[in-house]
Image: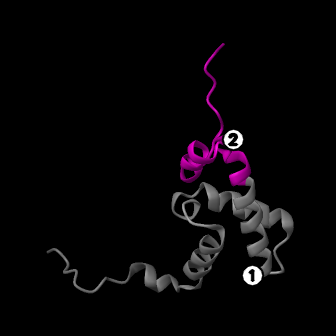
Amino acid sequence: MPNRRRRKSDQEPDALRHQRSSSGNADSSVKAWLARCEARLVETDPTISPAEAQRLARSMLEFERTGAMDPDAAVAFVLGELGKSQRDLFERRSGITPRH
């Protein structure tokens, strides 16, 4: 049997691999995470369609940082990041001196 590579969307997110070994059923953990994230997205912005919430939740789960968070914290984090102005992304951090 040839060794087929799985598509990224079919792979288990890194953040949930440890749950499989401890709970024995990562599939239900992933489904529960996605369902809670989708619900929280719609609660936060009722204009988001269920299909869009599902797509966003999957993207958030696959992203290493938000995938490692619980769903409520992941949604809060993304909303906080989206609320920042673009200017904040390029401001220097205090205490860092530029090299010349």
Mark 2 surroundings: few (<14), some (14-19) or many (≥20) residues within 10 A = few
Which amino acid, mark 2? Answer: Asp
- Is the C terminus in the top left, top right, bottom left or bottom right quadrant? bottom left
Q: Position of residue 41 (x, y in %)?
A: 74, 74
Q: Main secondary structure of the magenta part?
A: helix
Vertical arrangement, residue 91 with respect to residue 57, above or below? below
Residue depicted at 46% across the width and 85% down the height: 87
Query: How many numbered marks, from 0 up?
Result: 2
Please provide the residue range marked out in magenta: 1-30
- x and y percentages locating residue 91 in the rendered image: 37, 84
Residue type of the residue flagged with mark 1: Thr
Q: Is residue 85 above or below residue 51?
A: below
Q: Is residue 98 above or below residue 22?
A: below
Q: Secondary structure at mark 1?
A: helix
Whether residue 3 sits left or right of residue 54 in the image: it is left
Q: Is residue 5 magenta?
A: yes
Q: Residue at x 66, y 13 (%)?
A: 1
Q: Which picture quadrant has residue 75? A: bottom right
Examine the image and state in which quarter residue 11 appears: top right
Check disc 1 and report the residue beneath it.
44
- Element class at badge 2: helix
Q: Is residue 80 above or below residue 3?
A: below
Does the magenta segment cover residue 72?
no
- The residue drawn where x is 64% and y is 24% is 4
Mark sitting on residue 10: 2
Disc 2 to disc 1, how far (Cα)?
A: 28 Å
Contact (Cβ within 8 Å) of mark 2 with mark 1: no
Foreground of the two, 63 or 15? 15
Q: Position of residue 70 (x, y in %)?
A: 61, 67
- Left/right placement of residue 2 relative to residue 40 reads left
